[in-house]
């Protein structure tokens, strides 16, 4: 059976046309999907009964089940979704206020990048998610909002390396941007990458307006090779060249993510090295004090160390933001909930 959310608008139009169904029916289907996010074809009450049955015979509407749902006091909600093949991925809803609702999406089951401090990379990558599975995360999270509230931003920062699955991610983001999809403009969408130069250049050439966030995490190759093993193949210089290309092509200022790990990469000398590395670039550095992961030997830096690091960057002329992780109490770092669930005795946990 096909996943309805995997179909492009053109494919759905063609399917309807083959059955002599007028084109406006596609708009109605999309409204039920993205406006009301109904849970079955039988709820699409302005479609004829025969059309609803035909749709139900050929398409699945939802392919995931919610295996776990955690809520944090700050309003953050995290879903662990079980996919049709039994694999699991996570997605998160972050609430800033009534108008700002950000979803954080996964693009792969697991991750091949193996960052030393990350739960998602601990077991490697299993497979890419489909376009429909990426869109379904958005809709599952949208359903958590009260009626009348809508999703406003997307960050692709969950499990997986987004640029390793661009072929499925780009159509999913296109759906998110369409007025009869979720209506989230490209300028409110951020794609976060470990820094795959080819992928960054390809994204730049797509002629989109997405924000790009490059996870740097270290100011030199020696340290980055240890923290972000994918760096061994590329080196920081190639990552920065690709980031410069992205800025030239899109005019979007690139963000550099830097997870602060106590005693590892959070010292003033690292900050000074980072200033020298990014000198002359219109960059924004996002400092993220580490969110501990059980079983990994890294710790959250003291707030004084974080402040001192930020101060050195600012004195060096860089724009800096400190981003505290939301939802710490619900295993909100990427991959944590999946691992906690996999290691628990839940009946459907992975083999
Ligand atoms: S931090 Fe991102 S790129 Fe690195 S292992 Fe985790 S999910 Fe993959």
Image (cartoon, grey):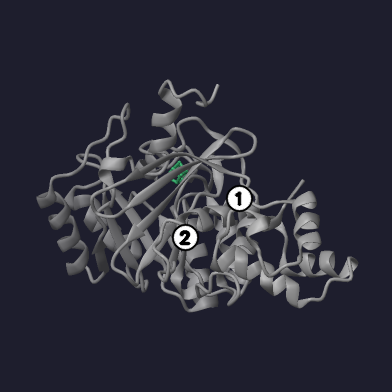
* Callout 1 secondary element: helix
Can you give x and y, in whole percent of width and height, for residue 268 in the image?
Answer: 17, 52
Ligand 1 within 8 A of label 2's CB?
no
- Quote the CA–CA distance across marks 1 and 2: 14 Å
Q: Residue at x 57, y 66 (%)?
A: 34
Look at the picture and state if 207 lies above or below 224: below
* Callout 2 secondary element: helix
**Quarter of the image with the C terminus in it:** top right
Q: Nearer the viewer, residue 263 or 32?
A: 32
Pointer 1 with pointer 2, Cβ within 8 A: no
Q: Nearer the viewer, residue 243 or 250?
A: 250
The residue identified by callout 1 is 133
Q: Residue at x 68, y 70 (%)?
A: 46
In the image: residue 239, left or right of residue 7: left
Q: Nearer the viewer, residue 347 or 209?
A: 347
The residue identified by callout 2 is 142
In terms of image quadrants, where is residue 20? bottom right
């Amino acid at each position: 059976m096909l996943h309805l959310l995997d179909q492009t608008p053109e494919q759905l139009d063609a399917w309807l046309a083959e059955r002599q169904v007028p084109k406006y029916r596609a708009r109605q289907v999309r409204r039920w999907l993205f406006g009301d996010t109904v849970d079955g074809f039988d709820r699409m009450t302005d479609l004829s009964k025969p059309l609803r049955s035909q749709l139900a015979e050929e398409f699945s509407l939802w392919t995931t089940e919610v295996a776990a749902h955690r809520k944090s006091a700050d309003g953050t909600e995290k879903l662990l979704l079980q996919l049709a093949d039994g694999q699991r991925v996570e997605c998160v809803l972050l609430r800033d206020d009534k108008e700002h609702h950000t979803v954080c999406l996964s693009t792969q089951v697991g991750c091949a990048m193996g960052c030393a401090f990350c739960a998602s990379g601990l077991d490697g990558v299993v497979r890419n998610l489909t376009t429909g599975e990426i869109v379904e995360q958005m809709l599952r999270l949208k359903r958590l909002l009260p009626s009348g509230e809508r999703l406003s931003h997307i960050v692709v920062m969950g499990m997986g390396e987004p640029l390793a699955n661009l072929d499925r991610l780009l159509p999913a983001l296109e759906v998110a941007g369409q007025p009869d999809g979720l209506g989230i403009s490209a300028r409110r969408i951020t794609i976060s990458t470990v820094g795959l130069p080819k992928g960054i250049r390809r994204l730049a050439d797509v002629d989109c307006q997405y924000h790009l966030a490059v996870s740097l995490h270290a100011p030199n190759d020696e340290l980055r090779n240890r923290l972000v093993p994918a760096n061994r193949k590329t080196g920081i210089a190639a990552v920065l060249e690709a980031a410069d290309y992205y800025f030239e092509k899109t005019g979007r200022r690139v963000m550099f993510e830097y997870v602060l790990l106590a005693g590892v990469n959070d010292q003033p000398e690292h900050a000074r090295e980072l200033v020298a590395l990014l000198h002359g670039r219109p960059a924004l550095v996002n400092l993220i004090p580490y969110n501990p992961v059980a079983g990994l030997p890294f710790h959250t830096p003291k707030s004084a160390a974080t402040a001192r690091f930020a101060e050195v960057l600012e004195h060096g002329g860089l724009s800096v933001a400190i981003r505290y992780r939301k939802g710490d109490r619900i295993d909100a770092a990427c991959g944590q909930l999946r691992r906690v669930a996999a290691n628990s005795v839940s009946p459907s946990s992975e083999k």
